[in-house]
Amino acid sequence: MMEVKAVVRPNKLSALRVALLEMPEFPGMTVSKVEGCSAPSKVNKANIKDELTDYSAKVRLEIICNAEIAGAIMEKIVSVCQTGQIGDGVVWCTPVPKAFFIAKSTGS
């Protein structure tokens, strides 16, 4: 199992959700509202106000999936969310040694 995580622009979430749901083995995702900023070396700050107020709204996705589809999910996130501008986000993947899906038992 793998955990795919991504931080992306909120305005891309709707299109990303549609694209991911089209994937046959997509297992679902958790979405959280987060804030973040770029590395100082990547963005020119005009003044101290810009330095202190550079946080921007983002959404963070967390997806637990089979290792076989983790790469395809990551590629889909990049292709849908990429605008070519600084601040598009980041996608990464980490191994999950063990995971259980919690569901209501259908037994008696």
Image: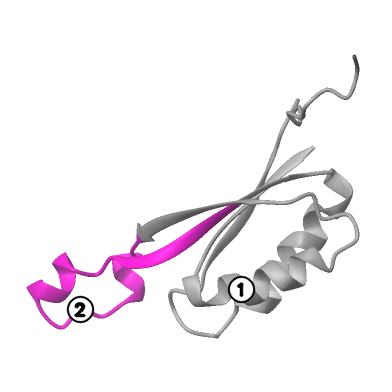
For residue 67, which numbered disc appears in the image? none
Q: Is residue 9 inside the magenta stretch?
A: no
For marks 1 and 2, the one nearer the N-term is 1
Relative to 67, is 39 above or below?
below
* Residue drawn at the location 20% of the way across and 78% of the way down: 45
For residue 14, which numbered disc appears in the image? 1
Quarter holding residue 66: top right
The boundaries of the magenta stretch are 36-61
Which percent across, then down, holds residue 3? 69, 43
Relative to 54, is 106 above or below?
above
Q: Along the line of sight, which residue is nearer the eye, 3 or 100?
A: 100
- Does residue 14 appear in the picture of this structure? yes
For residue 70, side relative to residue 80 (left or right): right
Q: Which residue is mark 2?
A: 45
* Residue drawn at the location 31% of the way across and 77% of the way down: 43
Relative to 99, is 88 above or below?
below
Asked if marks 1 and 2 touch (Cβ < 8 Å), the reply is: no
Which percent across, then down, holds residue 101? 76, 31
For residue 78, side relative to residue 10 (left or right): right
Which percent across, then down, holds residue 11? 50, 77
The residue furthest top is 108
Q: Amino acid at mark 2?
A: Lys
Can you say which quadrant of the picture contains the N terminus? Answer: top right
Q: Amino acid at mark 1?
A: Ser
Q: Residues within 10 Å of mark 2 (few under 14, many from 20)?
A: few
Report helix, strand or loop for mark 1. helix
